[in-house]
Image: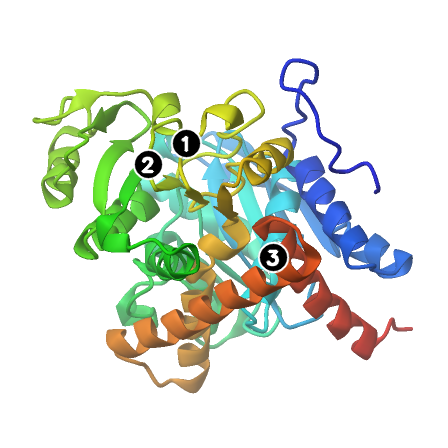
Amino acid sequence: MGTARLPVSATSIKEDLNSFRIAMRQFDYAAEKCGLEPGLCEVLRRPRRALSLSLPVKMDDGSIRVFEGFRVQHNSARGPCKGGIRYHPNVTFDELKALAMWMTWKCAIVNIPFGGAKGGIVCDPHKLSRNELERLTRRYTYEISPLIGPDKDIPAPDVYTDAQVMAWIMDTYSMTHGSSAPGVVTGKPLFLGGSLGRNEATARGCLFVIRAACEVMGTKLNEATVAIQGFGNAGSIAARLLSQDGAKIIAISDSRAGVLNHSGLTVPELVAYKAKTGSVANFPGSTAISNEAVLELQCDILIPAALENQITLQNAERVQARVVVEAANGPTTPDADLVLHNRGIMVIPDVLANAGGVTVSYFEWVQDLQELFWDEDDVNRRLERIMVKAFADVHATARKHNVEMRTGAYILAIDRVANAMRTRGIWP
């Protein structure tokens, strides 16, 4: 573990971009810093349970096609497992093991009583009909139903899954258990037990930690410039919320193009433009910019809200933002983390920055179990309290151990999970 964070040169080493090995490397470094005993270290380095599935589905033309699916549960010492389900042709077991581990730390950082999980199916949902997608979802749910439940493991939407997919999962689970169980998933439609504020939760959580970071750094948010890579749910809503706070959004990119205006982009018009055209490309009053160039703009706040491994050894020296806020999962590699830290750039890690989503998922689960629902202002107030405290806890831990924010977040999370495991003990 002692060599986990040795300084490296971008020209001398090819980075390992495997998600699970990155997750273990981040964990090993933090575990060493906080003196975690070897036995618990071995337990937390690997998932508690990992299920690999073959999913036969009857297609619309009558043929049978077999899909590959997974569900990974990393840890349940602090409560039921929690984590999304993604449908994507590039889903891998290693990726899901990493995401499940990150969910364990994310839940511990915001101090909600969940452990981490993640699931996925190797498929391209855009090439499936609605009926095929429903049959695939119900088959997958049936196969994982012994593992999931309101008090065991609570799935949620992730890449290319949505409220409709969650409704199918809830219905399948409920039918096989003989009673309606809305608490088995979160991210459901409102009329089936979903929570107000859930759609904006990830971006709103980012807003709250950005406000807290600006206080620490002595920056006024209403005078800050912002660049955002990714204009999906998290990126577009973050742009809107930050602009409402007075920040100037100077650049935004999506999967097809990027746009730049140093005087500031008009976010509502850009959202409407993308809804109409399918991309931000050629937005009036802007100049074109690449996804890669967005990361290297001079700005106060950079928000990677797209894919993993975007800030690497190859470009970390060219990042000019004062603070990087990871709305996406895993956009910064461990070596790039070290480069940014040494250059005085604060990175608010994904396990903190995008934890608003799982926090409001927790609120939804609580409301389902109580059968008592809150208004949106109440949800947002509760979210703000949790996110602001989580930022303060992570920042204090990082300063105490003289490490960057990601390692501070990991040390805080590992300590909370390890304490739960020590107190519960290993049985039998």
- Seen as rendered, the residue at the extreme top is 11
Helix or strand or loop: what does disc 3 sit on? helix
Residue 91 percent location from the top left of the image:
55, 35
- Which residue position holds label 2? 299
Q: Earlier in the sequence, mark 1 or mark 3?
A: 1
Residue plotted at (69% across, 69% down): 416
- Which residue position holds label 1? 320
Query: Which of these two is toward me, 158 or 249?
Result: 249
Asked if residue 234 can be seen in this view, the reply is yes
Residue 344 percent location from the top left of the image:
52, 41
- 122 relative position to 384: left or right: right
- Marks 2 and 3 in Cβ contact (< 8 Å): no
Which of discs 1 and 3 lies nearer the camera? The answer is 1
Quadrant of the frame with the N terminus: top right
- Marks 1 and 2 in Cβ contact (< 8 Å): yes
- Tell me the number on the disc at residue 409: 3
Q: Earlier in the sequence, mark 2 or mark 3?
A: 2
Residue 165 percent location from the top left of the image:
39, 52
In which image quadrant can residue 312 be found?
Answer: top right
Residue plotted at (14% across, 22% down): 282
Query: Which of these two is toward me, 31 or 46?
Result: 31
- 404 relative position to 428: left or right: left
Helix or strand or loop: what does disc 1 sit on? loop
* Amino acid type at mark 2: Cys
* Amino acid type at mark 1: Gln
Query: Which of these two is toward me, 223 or 423?
Result: 223
